[in-house]
Image (cartoon, coloured by chain):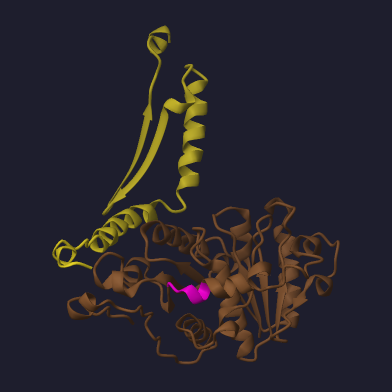
Amino acid sequence: MSILNFFSRNRSAPVARERLQLLLAHERTLAGKSDLVALLQREVLGVIARHIAIDPDKVIVKLDETGHVSTLEIDIEVPEGALARG
Amino acid sequence: MSKVMVVTSGKGGVGKTTSCASLGAALAQAGRNVVVVDFDVGLRNLDLVMGAERRVVFDLVNVVQGDAKLPQALIRDKRIDTLSLLPASQTRDKDALTEEGVGRVIDELREKFDWIVCDSPAGIDKGATLAMRFADLAVVVANPEVSSVRDSDRIIGLLDSKTRRAESGEAMEKHLLLTRLDAARAARGEMMKVEDVLEVLAIPLLGTVAESPDVLTASNLGCPITLHSPTSPAARAYTAAARKLLGETVTVTPAREKRGFMSLLFGKKAVLQ
């Protein structure tokens, strides 16, 4: 190790630790819920598809927990004109 | 009372098989009757690391499917007579294992051995979940590196939800074994320290094993390191870890690397547990 290296030390370990702490805090809240999200996505899609032709990939289900608030977000993209036809 | 222990990690290449062979050998050297079981069906390697690759006749899949009796498949180690190996099949895939079949084999092994050490395949699918399914305790092997730590966290989650023990509401005993450490780089802040990983994963530390050429030599020769070079730092770490598993109080000797002159002068000393 040269003197130059010594003064410009690569201290990436603290960054690694912080990134992991943030990421895992998020991932732990999702553990066990992935099945629920898939189930909701399938059933919501089933209901809508009975009335409107939609793209299965355009149904997005998100579960989120921040502090004391849990949110369930369902985002469905409907093709142009599909609602007008009724 | 026999114990079923799974050695697992999620990520591949972190040292599961090496750790499984070394802990198994160390437990056997401490006088326990031990079997190491390879669950990596299709990609077996425990036989190779244990130096028994030319003695495999029947395997775990044969026993699970009833094509061979357990004693026909067990390979007794030539160096330690209380150590046996149950190899995985090399030509089948993981779907050849069933939960019911694996459960039956584990029950039969419990009658013969004090310790049943299961070498889990990488990943989180069938092979890995079956390897942990009947475990009483788990050793999670990790390297101080972001992807390994993240995968370990995922595996810890599965140990706490998908094992028999977890499903029956009992606590799953989990231990962290950190391998491939480089204390000098950790001291320079280039690599996460033991306490960084412990803080993130929050399970108790079983031991630390420094990156070392001795480990590669031992696997080149097909001899667990605790037998091949028992005085090497890695072997001492595994022996200490085995004694800890046996309930002895062991002061964990930190994994050390030779330190360069500059790091001796300026590098902060790595504080290890």
Q: Position of residue B190 (x, y in %)?
A: 27, 64
Q: Nearer the viewer, residue B202 or A33?
A: B202
Q: Which colour denotes chain B?
A: brown
In this picture, residue B135 sits left or right of residue B144: right
Residue beneath the point at 59% across and 83% down = B228
Q: Quadrant of residue B3?
A: bottom right
In the image, is B263 to the left or to the right of B54? left
Q: Main secondary structure of the magenta part?
A: helix
Q: Does residue A61 sit above or below A31 in this rendering?
A: above
The residue lying toward the viewer, choosing from B188 and B2, is B188
Image quarter in which the N terminus of chain A is found: bottom left
Quarter of the image where the C terminus of chain A is located? top left
Provide the residue span drawn in magenta.
B211-215
Q: Where is residue A12, by image quadrant?
A: bottom left
Task: Return the x and y of residue B246 as percentages of the image width and height.
Answer: 55, 88
Residue at 22 percent of width and 61 percent of height: A10
Image location of residue B61, percent across then percent down: 76, 60
Which sits in the foreground, B89 or A62?
Answer: B89
Q: Position of residue B120 (x, y in %)?
A: 59, 64
Q: What residue appears at the point 61 percent right and 67 percent down from the top-left corner?
A: B119
Is B213 within the magenta? yes
Q: Colour of chain A?
A: yellow
> Which residue sits at x=73%, y=76%?
B109
Tell me: B180 left or right of A39: left
Q: Is residue B121 magenta?
A: no
